[in-house]
Amino acid sequence: MASVLLTWELGGGLGHLQRLRAIGVALAGLGHSITAAVRELGRGEKLFQGSPIRALQAPITVPERVPYPQCLSYGHLLHNVFLGPEVLRNQIRAWDEVVAAVRPALVVCDHSPTALLALRGKGIPVATVGTGFCSPPVREVLPLIQPWEEPDLQSILRHERELLGWVNQALSQEARPPLPRLPQLYQDVAQTCLLTFPELDHFGTRPGGRYLGTPPSHAESPADFPPGPGPKVFVYVEGSEGVTALLERLRDRGWPTLVVASPLSPDLPGRIQGQALHWARGPVDIQAAAAGCDFAISNVGHGVMSSMLLAGKPLLMLPLSVEQLLGAHRVLKLGAGLLLDLKGENAEAALDSMAGDPSLTAASRAFAARHRDHDGTAMLQRLAHGLEGLLGD
């Protein structure tokens, strides 16, 4: 039996924890001891209940201000995490303490760039898992993350060189091998496991990418849609004023609607009530929701996005982050969804299109047909055996 450390450092939502739970349970099934150092310990402990995974708090720094509130490149994102040589040294040392406590024979990193730095030169095999955004493509420079903008490329390259200097200063002081260039942080690993599909890679399909597809989500509450005429709608969003107005529109239409949301206030479910609108009490079985709905309204979290498309269901998308907006653009390229600007006046027209435009359903069904042989459970077992192979003798 080997000790395996799972890590999650960046990002929000349940997607990272769902992935790590699935991988950890599969590796535990092969006889290994699993510890997960996660960004949100409370949510991790709750989701890992009943599993053989022990949860720890991952070392993270939450600054009052970040250098780049508007990230245009992956380098800007890493700037906002590393924050300078001294902060980075402390982060590396904190990860060293986690590694010393767990003594892993293998580390599996989900969106954990500081952990990747800390593990350099330790002789422990490391694999990265997650969406395309979690493991950017290895090129000469880090990718842009708002390609629709027209950034000053020379300025971005200058920032990346500055960041590389910080990183190598911290690595040198902590007796770690230097990085010749920043993208190599994601190259110097034993395996890069892209838990997505080529069409949904945030940075576009990468030649030679090891696309494994998505694992099944941990089943939660059943996906019970209320009865009623009209399309069945699955809503999985974070609450906002715009979302409140959208839910009121759905209630008034009388379409059977199942809502999973972080409400603005505890009384929101009581204020937006209708015979055909049902508020879920907690996370639901996403695969069952995808099978039961006609379309979904989503912030474009990767798990919901991929589950809907695998079931041949289109998406009405309300991205809240750059990562989600990149994902939304992949769906738009497929023709399998629409973007909704909650500040605009297009909500009624968008709902009409989702219910009445057959091309959206046709495009999502075409995606499902291309991946009809995908079996998330079988993929997870193959992934676990592949990771186990990194342990050696």
Image (spheres, rainbow, N blue to C red):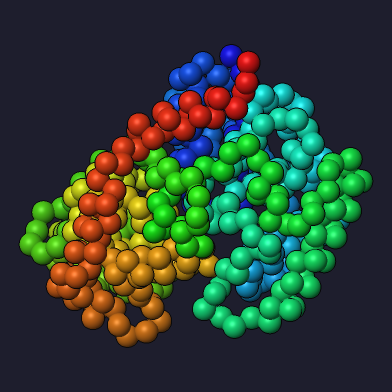
Viewer-nearest residue: 17 or 72 = 72
Asked where in the image residue 92 lies, by quadrant, the reply is: top right
Outermost residue, left direction?
A: 229
Question: Would you place residue 377 above or below residue 181 in this image?
Answer: above
Residue drawn at 24 percent across, 64 percent down: 363
Residue drawn at 54 percent across, 24 percent down: 388
Viewer-nearest residue: 232 or 239 = 232
Question: Would you place residue 57 above or below residue 357 in this image?
Answer: above
Q: Can see residue 60?
A: no
Question: Would you place residue 386 above or below residue 183 in this image?
Answer: above
Residue 20 in the image: state x and y as whole percent.
Answer: 51, 37
Residue drawn at 78 percent across, 73 percent down: 158
Q: How many numbered marks have been drawn onto this rendered protein structure? A: 0
Residue drawn at 73 percent across, 57 percent down: 182
- In the figure, is residue 344 to the left or right of 158? left
- In the figure, is residue 98 to the left or right of 335? right
Viewer-nearest residue: 148 or 314 = 148
* The N terminus - image quarter: top right
Q: Can see residue 103?
A: yes
Residue 333 in the image: state x and y as whole percent.
Answer: 36, 70
- In the figure, is residue 274 to the left or right of 263? left
Outermost residue, front direction?
A: 208
Residue 125 in the image: state x and y as whole percent.
Answer: 67, 31
Question: Would you place residue 81 above or below residue 345 in this image?
Answer: above
* The C terminus - image quarter: top right
Asked where in the image residue 3 lies, by quadrant, the reply is: top right
Asked where in the image residue 361 lies, by quadrant, the reply is: bottom left
Outermost residue, bottom direction?
A: 345
Residue 188 in the image: state x and y as whole percent.
Answer: 69, 44
